[in-house]
Every structure is written in C-alpha cells, then in structure tokens.
Image (spheres, rainbow, N blue to C red):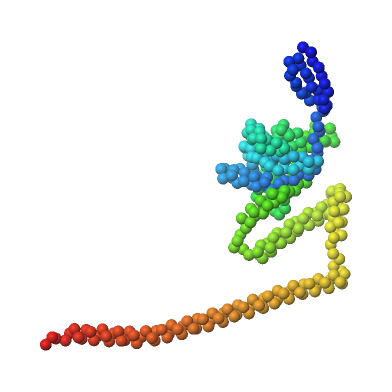
C-alpha cells in the first residue's frame, strides 16, 4: 500500500490506496495557560451558589458546599459566567477525610458542554467563609480538569460589608532552608461583573424582593448609610496598611501609594473661603426647603384636625335633632295603641 503526503494548511493529508482521507494535526507544543490576574464573577454564579447553600441547609447541617466554576480566560481576566453544584462531604474532626463525586462532575460538565461549548472548567468554589486545610488536596483533584484552577470562596451569609467573593490560585512555596516545597494559595483580585441582560434580570429580582411597606426616602437613607459603613471599613483598611508600612512591618507598594495619592488629590480643599461660603449657602438653601416643608406639613395637620372637630360637632347636633323628632312620633303611636285597646274592652250593647 502506497502512502502519499500533501501539506495543506499546516496539516498532513494522508491519501491511501482505498481513497480514504484522514487529517492528522501536526505535533505542536501544548499552549501554556495564561496567568490569571483578575477574576470576574457574574451574578448568575452568586445566585446559584446561594441556592445550593440554602437547599443543602434544609437537608442537613453542612458548614459549606462545593461546586465547579465554568467560564473562560480572556487575556488574564478569568470570566466566570456559570457554575454547578457537586456532591461533597467531609469529616469534621479529620480534615484528611473528604469525598467529592468526580463522576458526577464529569457527567454534569458533559451536559453543560452540549449547551455552551465555550464554557470550560476554570476552577471551583466553596462557601467557606475562610480557607480550609484540605482545600489544597481538593484543588489538586480539580486540576485534573483545569491545570490553572482557581478557588473562589463565596460567602453565602455575609456579615460584613463588601464583596462576598475571594479568589485564590495555588502556587509553589519555596523555603530558604532547602526543605521541600509545598502548595499554598495566593490571593488575586476579584470583582462582580455582569452583561446587560444579566443587569436587567438582577434589577427585576431586586424589584420583587423590595419591601413595599417602606417608603422610597427611607430606602435611600438606608442605602446611603450602608455605603457610608462600607467606606468606613475601607478607610480602616487603608489606615491599618499605612500604619504597618510606617512601622516597617510591610514593604512599600508603590502602585497602592499612587492610588492613594490620586484619592487625596480628588479631595476638595476645605480651607478655601470661596468653597466654605458656597457650602454654607447650599446648606442654608437646603435647610430652608426643609423648614418650609415642615411648616406646611404642620399647617395641613392642624387644618385637618380642625375640620375633623367640626365634622364631629355637626354629627352630634344632627343626632340630637333626630332624637327629638322621633320622640313625638313614639308618643302618638303609643296613644293610638292605647285607644285601640280601650275600644276592644268596651262591652257590646
């Protein structure tokens, strides 16, 4: 049997005598995975994780749940667009005893691949809320499906303000004393991102769960208060970082210092008299509106109170007149009844 090879578009086409053509891809080196610099978590993933956590909480008491993350790596930005739950159990007393159903994982990923072929396994998640000792071993299992696996801890019951997600990637920790290296997790930045269709869906969900008994003003004040609390927490973190840098506990990170300098540059100078005067005028104008509105509200309340008093007085007078009119009618009816009785008592002659 003769075999003829023709180069076509960097592939080798082998023509056999039986007129069958088989394409054989060239022997290329495997593409190195792009290092992940930022993790973007979509709202659909958050909703899926919270639903998974609540469902398992109803079945039995579980400290955390585990699942697989699907998405794509776009030039160092890991876009996590979907996820699915995986059966998982672990021993509370012994961290080395745990179970993850990888057969179920493979079957689920096969079905997800039929729906969306672009989504690949990019990592896994658990509801933490912190790292566990057996996370490294679980990550080694997930690396069989994704070499550059990412761990995202999603807090299903957040108690503090801020993002409920924390992303980590496994790295080799090298010791200076020559001891063997071991695996550890390195923190990477994470954020919440959504496409336009997802934003519309999230807005509809928030509209459905909104408390209709509360006014819009109280909701705005509550949102502003939550925002101020979040800003206070961030300022505390900045203060703690700067104190540690000043004491020499942490090295100076120039990009962070540049960002802080940009923040300080955007702050207004409150020592300028024109700025102080403009703030006073604006504050006085706003307080005048509030004062006039309070006066109008008080006048309307007094007017309604006076109208209510007048209506009650008129109603009492009308009731008295009706009673006086009904009394003579009752007396006449009584006299007529007495006369009829006397007529019946008279003997017949």
**Residue for point 86% across, 56% down:** 262
Horizontally, is 50 left or right of 19 in the view? left
Q: Residue at x 79, y 35 (%)?
A: 33
Compared with 201, 347 (above or below) is below
**Foreground residue among 242 and 208:** 208
Quadrant containing the N terminus in the rendered view = top right
Q: Residue at x 83, y 36 (%)?
A: 175
- Image quarter where the C terminus lies is bottom left
- Estimate the x, y position of residue 284 in percent, counting from the top left: 77, 75
- Is residue 45 placed above or below 322 in the rendered structure? above
Q: Is residue 243 above or below residue 342?
A: above
Nearest to the observer: residue 118 or residue 95: 118
Examine the image and state in which quarter residue 39 appears: top right
Identify the residue shown where x is 71% and y is 46%. 42
Rendered location of residue 149, percent (x, y) = 74, 37
Residue 115 appears in the rendering: yes
Please provide percent x and percent y for residue 34.
80, 37
Q: Indicate left or right for 341 with 222 as reference.
A: left
Nearer to the camera, 126 or 32: 32
Above or below residue 38? Residue 23 is: above
Q: Quadrant of residue 338?
A: bottom left
Nearer to the camera, 187 or 144: 144
In-image side of 16 versus 51 (left or right): right
């Amino acid at each position: 049997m003769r075999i003829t090879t023709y180069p076509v578009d960097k592939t080798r086409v082998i023509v056999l005598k039986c007129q069958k053509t088989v394409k054989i891809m060239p022997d290329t080196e495997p593409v190195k995975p792009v290092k992940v610099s930022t993790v973007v978590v979509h709202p659909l993933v958050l909703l899926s994780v919270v639903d998974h956590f609540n469902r398992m909480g109803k079945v039995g008491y579980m400290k955390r749940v585990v699942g697989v993350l699907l998405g794509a790596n776009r030039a160092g930005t890991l876009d996590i667009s979907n996820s699915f739950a995986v059966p998982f159990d672990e021993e509370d007393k012994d961290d080395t005893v745990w179970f993850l159903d990888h057969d179920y994982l493979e079957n689920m990923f096969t079905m997800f691949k039929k729906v969306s072929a672009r989504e690949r396994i990019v990592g896994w998640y658990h509801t933490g809320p912190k790292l566990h000792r057996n996370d490294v071993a679980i990550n080694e299992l997930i690396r069989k499906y994704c070499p550059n696996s990412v761990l995202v801890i999603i807090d299903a019951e957040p108690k503090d303000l801020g993002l409920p997600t924390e992303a980590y990637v496994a790295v080799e920790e090298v010791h200076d004393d020559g001891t063997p290296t071991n695996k550890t997790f390195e923190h990477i930045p994470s954020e919440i991102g959504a496409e336009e269709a997802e934003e519309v869906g999230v807005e509809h969900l928030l509209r459905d769960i909104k408390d209709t008994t509360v006014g819009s003003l109280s909701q705005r004040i509550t949102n502003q208060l939550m925002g101020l609390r979040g800003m206070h927490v961030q300022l505390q973190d900045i203060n703690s970082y700067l104190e540690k840098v000043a004491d020499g506990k942490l090295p100076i990170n120039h990009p962070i210092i540049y960002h802080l300098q940009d923040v300080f540059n955007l702050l207004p100078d409150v020592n300028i008299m024109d700025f102080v005067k403009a703030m006073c005028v604006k504050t006085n104008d706003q307080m005048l509106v509030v004062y006039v509105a309070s006066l109008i509200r008080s006048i309307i309340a007094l007017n309604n109170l006076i109208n209510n008093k007048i209506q009650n007085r008129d109603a009492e007078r009308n009731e008295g007149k009706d009673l006086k009119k009904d009394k003579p009618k009752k007396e006449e009816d009584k006299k007529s009844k007495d006369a009829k009785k006397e007529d019946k008592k008279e003997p017949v002659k």
